[in-house]
Image (cartoon, helix red, strand yellow):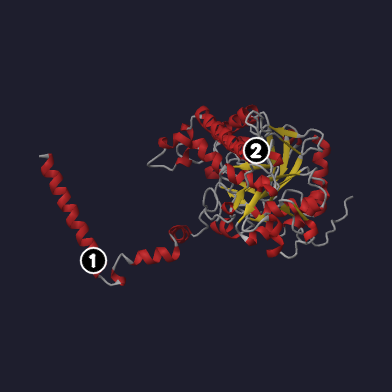
Amino acid sequence: MLRLIEKWLRAAIDETVDRALARVVRDEYPESIGEMVGALRKVGGLNALEITMRAAQGAPAPRPLGSPLRLSPWDKLLFNPVHLCRFPTPENVPIDTAVTIGPRARRPLTVAIPVLIAGMSFGGALSKRAKIALARAATAVGTATNTGEAPLLEEERAAARLLIGQYNRGGWLNRPEQYRRVDAIEIQPGQGAQGSTPQRTSARNIGPDFRAAFGLEPGQDAVIHSRLPGVNSQADFIRLVRRLRAETGVPVGVKLAATHHLERELAVALEAGVDFVTVDGAEGGTHGGAPTLQDDVGLPTLYAVARARDFLVRQKAAGDVSLIAAGGLITPGQMLKAMALGADAVYTGTAALMTLIGEQAAEALPFEPPTSLVVYTGKRTGELDVDRAARSLQRFLNACVREMEMVAVTLGRTALSEIGRSDLCTLDPVLARATGVQLGLVAPDRQHRLFPEVAPDRRLPGWAEPPGPPAAEPFSAEPVH
């Protein structure tokens, strides 16, 4: 009986498919579903979906996790192994992975590994269970996690040995009783995925725990403004930085969306006396932002990091002001390349969330997306196993650092902080000129053949440092009283 049913079904399906294919081939385009092939190829599948969503909702379609575009050409940078000109590091020599953020602060922040957990807020983005898991994993590997644009969550503070708090545009961690309890303060006037655009979480998506933590009234929306409260001039920002540094003694930094105005932004930050700068590239993730903000605003992380480091060097601030890279850093290789270009540490967000979900994704599939386990509004958010999630992220971070250590060995370095641009080469002439990384197409002492501006007397064995970028436009801050 079963064989007869199987035979009948196969015949019916075969006949249906044959007729459908015949219609696709014989019908003219206006009458054929085949026209969708060309249309989708022209428009793109994701764009077609978002066109339909805009038409249905009459509003921007908030896309989670940031832009799918890969704007930073990390794959065009390669590390240079050594054999004889400099010997590899012996396998019994440990690789130093620690880094200190804000060394000139009264209470610098020292982490065991240079990978930090990026700012992802409770409520506006993640569930409480997800935040606790992030904090536990960070503590297990000796690094810091970040509050994101949210108040100080007691459960997160208890789980995190090292916690960076964001002084944010919603004003939720901006009171002394909160920011004095964190280990570093990151002032957040913007982020890579959305710039400084205001954001709003509707009251209908705010539960009792969210409302209590944020101090919201029933029916009140949670609003992130385009400006920091009370900061309406450069002088206001400078006063804020100086006040927070004097009050707390912890490193006080600023998180900037990468922009072509980067050097001018950094000039204000240095005038204020920040201890660290976080440069968040256009590939940065977010809980949900307008596609145009994600795809068409900002500067790619790779170029932003190189430019920021060059500016700090020119201003003689590189040893005092730490640089943290953020935005689309997914693999250990990308993270280490960002450090080689000048970052002291890196943030990971999207990759951390993916590993947090890890093997638990099966709990949500096939009827809900895996992210429903970690986002605040997710239908399966209460089902996340916090301990399993933390262990998964802990293993991921350990594996990432181990891969970085392996690269350091073949480069002949004994610390990740020793890896620099001389350990890189590129096959892209434009990238070489933009970043100062040597072009791998010709020998180091022949770089001037392609780049005549590199004078012979400036070339060193194995390394040619091109002239730095042009100086930033003249800057003068408003007087600080």
Q: Which mark, residue 443? A: none
In the picture of the structure, the residue carrying the numbered disc 1 is 23
Crowding at label 1, few (<14), some or many (≥20) Cα neighbours within 10 Å?
A: some
Residue 314 is at least partly visible in this image: yes
Residue 291: horizontal and vertical position, in percent? 54, 57
Q: Nearer the viewer, mark 2 or mark 1?
A: 2
Q: Is residue 58 above or below residue 415?
A: below
Q: What's under tag 1, amino acid-wise?
A: Arg
Residue 215 is at least partly visible in this image: no
Q: For the residues marked 2 and 1, what is the alpha-carbon distance in whole angstroms?
A: 64 Å
Residue 424: horizontal and vertical position, in percent? 65, 49
Chain-order first, disc 2 or disc 1: 1
Along the line of sight, the residue nearer the viewer: 298 or 436:
436
**Splitting the image into 4 quarters, where does residue 125 fall?**
top right
Horizontally, residue 377 falls left or right of residue 472, namely left
Horizontally, residue 51 falls left or right of residue 175, namely left
Along the line of sight, the residue nearer the viewer: 336 or 120:
336
Residue 449: horizontal and vertical position, in percent? 69, 64
In the picture of the structure, the residue carrying the numbered disc 2 is 88
Of all residues shown, which one is farthest toward the right? 481
Residue 360: horizontal and vertical position, in percent? 45, 34
